[in-house]
Image (tube, rainbow, N blue to C red):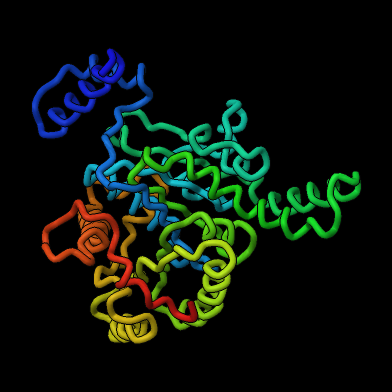
Amino acid sequence: MDWGENLACACVEAYDYLYKGMRFERDLLGLLVCLYGGIRTPMRFPRTQVIALVNQKGGCGKTSSSVAIAAAFCNLGYSACLADTDPQCNATESFGVRAESIVEGGKYTLADAYLKKRAATDLELDFGERFGGNLTLLPGHRGLSSVPLKLESELQIAIADGEKTTLDADEMRGEQRLRLKKSLDTLRGKRDVVIIDTPPSLDFLMVSTLVAADWFIIPVFPSGYDLKGLELLMRTVSKVKERYNPGLRLAGVLLGNYDRTAILDRQIHEMLKGRFGGETVFNTTIGRSVRMREATVHGKTIFEMPDAGLQAEQFQALIHEMLNRGSKKKDQTLNPLPDDEIFGKVANG
C-alpha cells in the first residue's frame, strides 16, 4: 500500500471515529477534505446499484423522494450519487445549488453526458464534509430540455454530410439512448448507489434513464390520476427491457403523501398491492407533511432539518426495507437490493 492509500485509509478511520462521537480537530479534518475533495467511505455493496425514480406524472414525489433516498443511504453509511436528468433541475437546487451557476463556473452538467459524452466522474459535484463525503451530485441543467432536438440535429447533419445514411439512423439513435448509461458506468465500483431523478414524461430522457438503470422505483400519491398512468409507464418499461436493458427490475412502488387516517389512502395502498403484487409495493409509506417542502425551500435534505425527524425516519425505514427484502435475517442491512426472484413480477414486462 503506497503513501496515498495509507493516507486515504487514515482519512476513513478518522471520519469513523468522528462519526461515533469521539473528538477530533476539525481543522485537520477540513484540511483532509480540501486535499481530497471529501472523505470517501469504502463501498459496502459488492456492486454499484443504479436506481431510477420514474413516473411520467408530475407532482408525485419523484424529486423529493430521490433527494431523501440518496441522503438516507448516506445517513446509513453508504456512498451515493444523485443524478438529476430533469430539465427543471429541482433535485439540483434542493441542495442549495443554483443550476445556472454550474455552467457559469465552467463545470459540466448531465447535458454534457449526452452532448459531449462526458463521463459521470467528470460531472460530479462534491459537498465536502456536509454529508461526510458520502454524497455527490450530477447536476441537471435547463439545457437538458433541448438535448433530444440537438441529438436529432446531430444525426441529420451526419446524414447530410454523407458520413451516415438513413439506414444508419436507427443505430445512431440507439447509441444516443446509451450515452447516459455509458456515463454512469464510470461510477460503478466507486459508489454504492446512484439515484436518478427523472422528468415527468416518457420522452428521450426518461427512456435513456431506464436504459441506464438496474432498478426503478415508482413513486405515486394516493390519487386515481396517479394510478391511471401506470399502465403506459409499464408498457414503456417492457419495451426498454426487451430492446436495451433486460436486467431492468422493479424495486418497488412507493406511496407518498399518505394519510393513515384516510380510508381512501389505505384502499389505494391495497389496490397497488393487487396490481403489482404485495411483495413489490413497499410497506413503508411516506406521510403527508409540510416538512418536505420546507427542506426544499431551505436547500437542505430532511436529514438536515431539526423538525423533520419523522420524515427522516420514514425514508430510513424505506432503505432498511429495500436492504432487508430477500434476506432471511430481519436486521441484516448489508445485503444489496432484493433477490431477483422477488421482482420478477413486473406488470406487462
Is the N terminus in the top left, top right, bottom left or bottom right quadrant? top left
State how many labels appear.
Answer: 0
Going 71% across and 56% down the picture, which residue do you hit? 173
- State the residue in front, 249 or 164: 164
Going by the image, does 213 lie left or right of 23?
right
What is the x, y in percent for residue 137? 44, 40
Residue 99 in view, yes or no: yes
| Whole-percent x, y for residue 182 in the image | 55, 45
| Residue at the image position 77 percent from the left and 53 percent from the top | 152
- Pick the residue in front: 40 or 247: 247
Displayed quadrant of residue 106? top right
- Direction from residue 235 to residue 188 in the image, left or right: left
**Residue 49: percent from the left, percent from the top?**
37, 52
In the image, residue 282 above or below residue 87? below
**Observer able to see residue 304:** no
Q: Pinpoint residue 348: horizontal percent, then vertical percent.
A: 49, 81
Q: Please tell me whether residue 327 is drawn above or below residue 77 in the rendered image.
A: below
Q: Residue furthest left?
A: 22
Q: Which residue is rendered at x = 90% and y = 44% of the image?
A: 161
Residue 266 in the figure: left or right of residue 157: left
The answer to whether residue 26 is above or below residue 281 is above
- Seen at 48% across and 37% down, the residue is 97
